[in-house]
Amino acid sequence: MKNTRHPRYARHRFPAEVISHAVWLYFRFPLSLRMVEEMLVARGILVSHETVRQWALKFGQSFANQIRRRLPASGDKWHLDEVVISISGKKHWLWRAVDQHGAVLDVLVQSRRNAKAAKRLLRKLLKKQGAAPRVMITDKLASYGVAKRQIMPGVEHRQHRGLNNRAENSHQPTRRRERIMKRFKSAGQAQRFLSVHDQVANLFRRPANTTAAAHRASRTQAFRAWAEVTGVASA
């Protein structure tokens, strides 16, 4: 295995290939830190689960930010939904927005499910996306309507539970991770983890109704982008 001189990994004992692979495993698949540790051991790489956790904290958000900049522009139809999650025995709400293609636009963990929380989500989305959508689709929670009228008054708003399956389905990977991680320990931890997890999922997401050949080409492109994002390509 070749050593890397990429400045991002200065003073790290392990090369970029090992660190980026561990971070990819942790955020890409429903694996615990100890599972990632064992998978690395199987390849002859002796590293503790605590080291994997530190790698995820140090590099994860940086990788996610670069992935976001590389992905195609989001669609003009936003699906918004919120789901309850339990953190330290207290109820929190995970707000998530996806576009019509299934790409996650953003997530926001909040302690409330009201108009103020909905406005925070819309402001964050507008800041990250740089423009309002053509259509916003939500369930019948009244808070969305209040927030939309104040933040994006010119956007068409459709409220119908049956139209919002795309956003509701996007919560399923989070539920799987909750079980593996035995629930999130804090709202901050949930926000940090999901902000990275969803961008990695976007990069490796399989578009709907694609052929096997198109999927292989898309996956090859995703791995190439991952190598560039993590610095492995230049190692």
Image (spheres, rainbow, N blue to C red):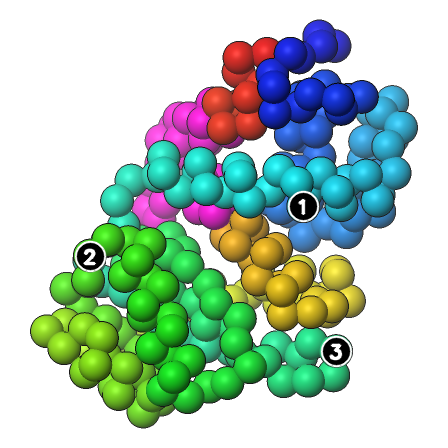
Q: Give the residue type that dot 2 points to.
A: Ala
Mark 1 Cα shell of 10 Å, populated few (<14), some (14-19), many (≥20): some
Residue that protrudes farthest toward the bottom in the picture: 142
Left or right for 156, reference 79: left
Verify whether residue 71 appears in magenta: no
Residue linked to disc 3: 88
Which label's residue is closer to the chain start, 1 or 3? Answer: 1
- Which residues make up the magenta segment? 199-226
**Residue 131: mark:** 2
> Which image quarter holds the C terminus?
top right
Estimate the spatial distance between the alpha carbons at disc 2 and disc 1, rounded to whole Å.
30 Å
Estimate the spatial distance between the alpha carbons at disc 1 and disc 3, rounded to whole Å.
21 Å
Q: Splitting the image into 4 quarters, where does residue 61 fall? A: top right
Q: Splitting the image into 4 quarters, where does residue 10 fall? A: top right
Assess whether mark 1 and mark 2 are in contact (beta carbons under 8 angstroms).
no
Mark 3 Cα shell of 10 Å, populated few (<14), some (14-19), many (≥20): few
